[in-house]
Amino acid sequence: MESQKQNSKKRKQVFPYGNYKSYYGYRIGQGVDEDPRLKVLRKEWFEGKDCLDIGCNNGIITIQIAQKFCCQRILGVDIDSDRVEDAYWNLRKTVRLKSTGNKPVKASKLQDKDHADDSENSVTTLLNVKTEEISKEHSSSEQIDLLKIVSFKRENFVQTQHPPGKQYDTILCLSVSKWIHLNWGDDGLITLFAEVWKLLRPGGIFVLEPQPWKSYESNRNVSETTAANYRNIMIRPEQFQEILLDKIGFRTVEDITSGLTDSKTGFNRPILVFCK
Ligand SMILES: C[S@@+](CC[C@H](N)C(=O)[O-])C[C@H]1O[C@@H](n2cnc3c(N)ncnc32)[C@H](O)[C@@H]1O
């Protein structure tokens, strides 16, 4: 009876901002050791750079980027405080895996009641694989101190006054634009682009993975707000590139989508890289 109640509670859980728990459980898929997007990102955009990841969810990509590309710093922000908590949990877990010499860590030691879900094993595997690869690249004396490099913060990116003066070298916005567009309409989308521009140093890089318009339809009814905004949205994802170049002011764009090889998970979305 109790478990029936819990099941129906689980089924009713709605994620109006794309703030899915266990996102990578289905995004990355079985038997894939690395998110395919990491294979097309270039080291020079991150190495020794100050980076921002908008909509970081549980922080797995943020942490992997920090490790793989040796960022000077990377901040992940997410509107959902539970996802930020998950991200810190994953960061601490990664650091623990590193400090135990990358031996598989007992699940019982890692799991807690909030995180003992289906995605746990695949997430631990991902963190394990990446940690092993990184440790091959860095000798123990130059092991990077992830806790100093990676941080997370709860923030609604489009409704936050960013302090003047703070700027980044590289900003990521992966599979987030649809959620901002549906929740805050065309104005919210333009605010996203304008804020990114403002927060980037000259020569800075903006990595954008927009969801296609047809995918908006399946999420339009997650809330009354999204349903209303969906009806009023005039801008389509196909226009983002032109807006970013001609209206926002980015100098160049490169489409790096063709490097994405893994189509198994059905997540082959364009990835565009803009330079300020
Ligand atoms: C579908 S997930 C994408 C996660 C990650 N960027 C990736 O591609 O693997 C979208 C994330 O964006 C976050 N998000 C949505 N609107 C946001 C906003 N206005 N400010 C900050 N985060 C937001 C959600 O909470 C969610 O975790």
Image: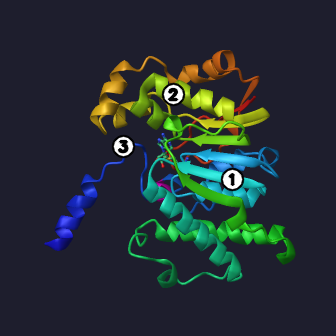
Using the image, tell me which numbered label, if any, was put on residue 74.
Answer: 1
Say which of 83 and 207 sits in front: 83
On the rendered image, what quadrant is the N terminus found in? bottom left
Using the image, tell me which numbered label, if any, was put on residue 45.
Answer: none
Disc 2 secondary structure class? helix
Image side of residue 193 versus residue 156, left or right: right
Task: Indicate the amino acid at tag 3.
Answer: Pro
Residue drawn at (34%, 32%) of the image: 226
Image side of residue 186 versus residue 126, left or right: left
Does any portion of residue 132 appear in the rendered image? yes
Say which of 11 and 190 sits in front: 190
Q: Which residues are magenta?
A: 22-26
Disc 1 secondary structure class? strand
Label 2 lies in ligand 1 vicinity (Cβ under 8 Å)? no
Residue drawn at (45%, 37%) of the image: 179
Circle nearer the N terminus (1, 2): 1
Mark 3 crowdedness (10 Å alpha carbons): few <14, some 14-19, many ≥20: some
Q: CA distance from mark 3 to mark 2?
A: 16 Å
Q: CA distance from mark 3 to mark 1?
A: 26 Å
CB within 8 Å, label 1 to label 2: no
Task: Indicate the amino acid at tag 2.
Answer: Leu
